[in-house]
Amino acid sequence: MRLSYKNNFAGYFKFYYNIVGNRLLVYLGLSIVISFLDGMGLSMFIPLLQAVNKSGNQPSNQESLGQLHHLTDWIQSLGFDLTITTVLSILVLTFLIKGVIKFVQLSYYASLKMIFLKKVRYKLLNNLENLSFSAFLKVDAGKIQNTMTNEVGRLFLTMTSYFSAAQSFAMLATYIFLAFISNYQFAILVCLGGVLSNGIYKTLYKRTKKLSIKISEKGSSFNSFLIQAVHYFKYLKSTNQFSSYSKKLKDVIAQTEILNKRIGLNKAIATSIKEPVIITIVSLVILLQVNWMGATLDSIILTLLLFYRALTALVAVQNDWQGFIENVGGIESITTVSAEMEGERETIGSVHPGQLKDQVLFDNVSFSYGSKKALDGVTISLPYKQTIALVGESGSGKTTIANMIAGLLLPDEGTVSFDGIPFKSLNLNQYRNKIGYISQESVIFNDSIYNNITFWAEPTSQNLHRFNKVLEMASLKGFIQSLPDKEKTQLGDNGILISGGQKQRISIARELYKECEILIFDEATSALDSETERVIQENIEKLQGSYTMVLIAHRLSTIKGADVIYLLENGKLSASGSFEEMMSSSTRFKRMVSLQSV
Ligand SMILES: Nc1ncnc2c1ncn2[C@@H]1O[C@H](COP(=O)(O)OP(=O)(O)OP(=O)(O)O)[C@@H](O)[C@H]1O
């Protein structure tokens, strides 16, 4: 399914059709049946008039019905007498059937809505899931959030209005058809009235559409500011910067509401001119009918009835279209965001990685973020079940290498390979199943400890056993035992209810539970006190030899046990070897160690 559209009536139809398929035709079919029944019901007023005329002993005026007298002829040919009771019974029956079909249509609409919203949200979520990491680095989180929530809602409103307009249009067509066969001059007047008022509405629609698109943009920036306000709440609160920050948010709110007010103003104009326009046209028709066409009373009543219904349908078309235009920004922003994300889709190779046997190898790798060179001709080997450590000053390129090992970034020059398979050809999704990543910012979901560690695994005895094992490995057993709700303890948004060190241990436990093959610790022990750090350190050491591991650490004491240490300087490799080798061969490394000892 591709979310794209052409900016015209048929283009919108195709857009909705692409999402919900033939269900749309069923819905439209039901709309047409309802319009037809409505027309049928109204036509019953014609024989009703005749029946009233007959009972009043007035001559029945076949001429005033135009070609519609065929309807009364048809009813009589079925063997029904045109009495008031017969006609009223047919009228009641028609509207009863219409009510039943309306119910079916509305129930169908409820499931259509569910399918529509689900499909669009799934599509956007898939787009996000498949987005490349380098594109994600440039992404506006507020825009994505706004699109997934508000804009999908607005998009659905456009579909509601669009099909409601289509249904009203079917009604309008029914009455115009009835009008044509009853009195063609009248029909021409209806059309003229429609065309006339349409001119006024077109200008209003154009203005509303522009405002609607602007509202979508404002929605994105509102969400962006809001996400950051929540994310940096502690900082904003402790430094009393919240008031100046919320000023920015309030500005966006005010601008959005001004746009909404302008849309409301357009709506007010559109709504308030409707009745005067209708009444003027109705009066003109009556004048024309009485003065120049010598119309009789029942012909005027019939004309008025058809005319009134046709114009009501026309007003409904205009109202629905106004509703459509008010939310058209939703289509615009969803298709744009979806296309943008699709354009930045990660390309995944097809070669399936087996178990790591030999090594992950960086061969003369260079990488830049835009014009900023982060890695320059780096050659590194990560051998099977060995531990390497990356050290270097802040900004020297350690995290970039870690991201490359996880396949998040691909080299601009040189190759990164897994047992000889270049990452470009590798099925990176399968490869990443092997990766455990414990990053500088611990990842904690707003859920229980158990779910955070097991990633929502069923609490079977086997899983619970595995869970308890990793609690011990990550030194979490004592902490969890001390909590009243034990492993069911909720951690709050972003782990706000636990300490930085506890967050890290939970992250470590999650990766151990996953039973990954390659473990990346990016400053994993930086937020721990020295005692906890020692325990975790011992645990990492226990893992050495069982996992292929990458350690990134500023504290050099923590990487003493690594098989090979790589020292980076400004994206270049300046030395490598075991801790002892580095101490004797690299004066820079030796200085770093001695500075930390001090
Ligand atoms: N998304 C980005 N866009 C532009 N430049 C970036 C981006 N991420 C990192 N860099 C730059 O690339 C260089 C290497 O960054 P990297 O994060 O790999 O360093 P690091 O050694 O891990 O630093 P630290 O120890 O502070 O985490 C730095 O100069 C940094 O400014």
Image: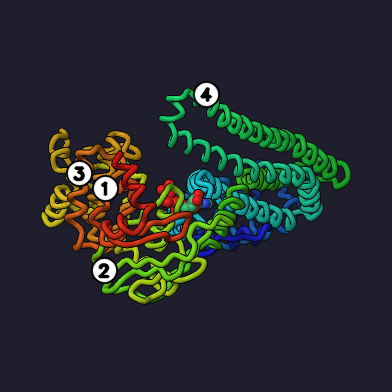
Closer to the camera: disc 1 or disc 2? Answer: 1
Q: How far apart are marks 1 and 3 (CA)?
A: 10 Å
Mark 2, residue position: 384
Q: Which residue is drawn at 38% across and 60% down?
A: 575
Q: Does ligand 1 reach within 8 Å of label 4's beta carbon?
A: no
Disc 1 to disc 4: CB gap under 8 Å: no
Which residue is pictured at 16% across the width and 34% down the height? 483
Most foreground residue, 371 or 572 = 572
Q: Which residue is drawn at 49% across and 45% down?
A: 145
Which amino acid, mark 2?
Tyr
Q: Which mark is residue 534?
A: 3
Q: Earlier in the sequence, mark 1 or mark 2?
A: 2
Query: Which label number is shown at residue 414?
Result: none
Decide if residue 216 is in sight here. Answer: yes
Disc 4: which residue: 243
Q: Vertically, is 369 above or below 294?
A: below
The reply to whether the C-beta atoms of the residues labelled 2 and 4 are less than 8 Å apart is no
Nearest the camera: 92 or 47? 92
Label 1 secondary element? helix
Mark 3 near ligand 1 (CB under 8 Å)?
no
Q: How far apart are marks 2 and 4 (CA)?
A: 53 Å
- According to the picture, the residue beneath numbered tag 1 turns out to be 557
Whole-angstrom CA distance, mark 1 to mark 4, is 43 Å
Kindly tell me whether residue 105 is visible in this rendering. no
Q: How far apart are marks 3 and 2 (CA)?
A: 25 Å
Q: Which amino acid does label 3 sit on?
A: Arg
